[in-house]
Amino acid sequence: MNSEKNRICEKKYVVPFHDLDPMQIMWHGNYLKYFDMTRSALFANAGVDLFGYFKNTNYLFPITKTMTKHTASLHYLDAFKCTATVLEAQYKIVMDFQIRLVESNQICAKGRSEQVAVKYPEKEIMFEIPEEIRKALGF
C-alpha cells in the first residue's frame, strides 16, 4: 500500500448545536475533535488500526504536539470539510489539517499534530515509526 493516496483524507461535517460556545460560534477546542476524527479516517483508509496494532505489538502512538491557527469562525449548521495530510512518517507522524467552509472554500482553521511510537509498558519512545505503519501511510 505504498501510495500517496493514503497520505490525505477529507471528511465533511456540519456544526452541531452542542459544539457552540456562548458566542454562538464553534468552541475552539472542538476543532481538535474534527482534526482527530479526520486523522482516524485517514488511518482507517490506509488500513491502519492503531488500537489493533497496540494489542498485537504494545506500541502506542500518542499525540505529542498540536498547533491550531483560527482564521474564521464556524457557526451553527455550517457545512465544512476537514482535510488531514500526512507530511512525515519516518521518526514521527506529522499531519497538517485544514478546515474549510464547503460553500465558499474559505479556510477557517489550520493545524498540525505530531505523534511518536512508544513501547508499552516501558513507556520508551521509539526513534522510528514501525515499518508497517510507514508503508501503509505511503512512506
Image (tube, rainbow, N blue to C red):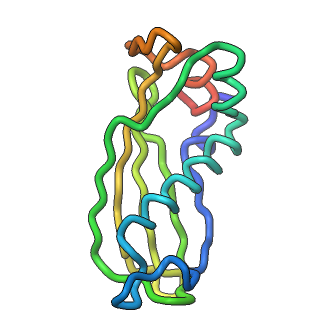
> How many tags in the picture?
0
Quadrant location of the N terminus in the rendered image: top right
Does residue 124 sit above or below 96 in this rendering? above
Does residue 98 sit above or below 85 in this rendering? below
**Residue drawn where x is 43% and y is 22% of the image:** 90
Query: Is residue 126 visible to the viewer in this orientation of the structure?
Result: no
Q: Nearer the viewer, residue 54 or 78?
A: 54
Query: Is residue 30 visible to the viewer in this orientation of the structure?
Result: yes
* Left or right for 11, reference 98: right
Does residue 3 sit above or below 116 in this rendering? below
* Left or right for 103, reference 56: left
Query: Percent from the top left, x then y, of residue 10?
Result: 59, 60
**Residue drawn where x is 29% and y is 52% of the image:** 67
| Quarter where residue 15 is shown | bottom right
**Residue drawn where x is 67% and y is 33% of the image:** 48
| Quarter where residue 65 is shown | top left
**Residue drawn where x is 39% and y is 85% of the image:** 25
Query: Percent from the top left, x then y, of residue 43?
Result: 63, 41
Q: Nearer the viewer, residue 6 or 11?
A: 11
Query: Percent from the top left, x then y, of residue 103?
Result: 53, 88
Does residue 62 sit above or below 31 in this rendering? above
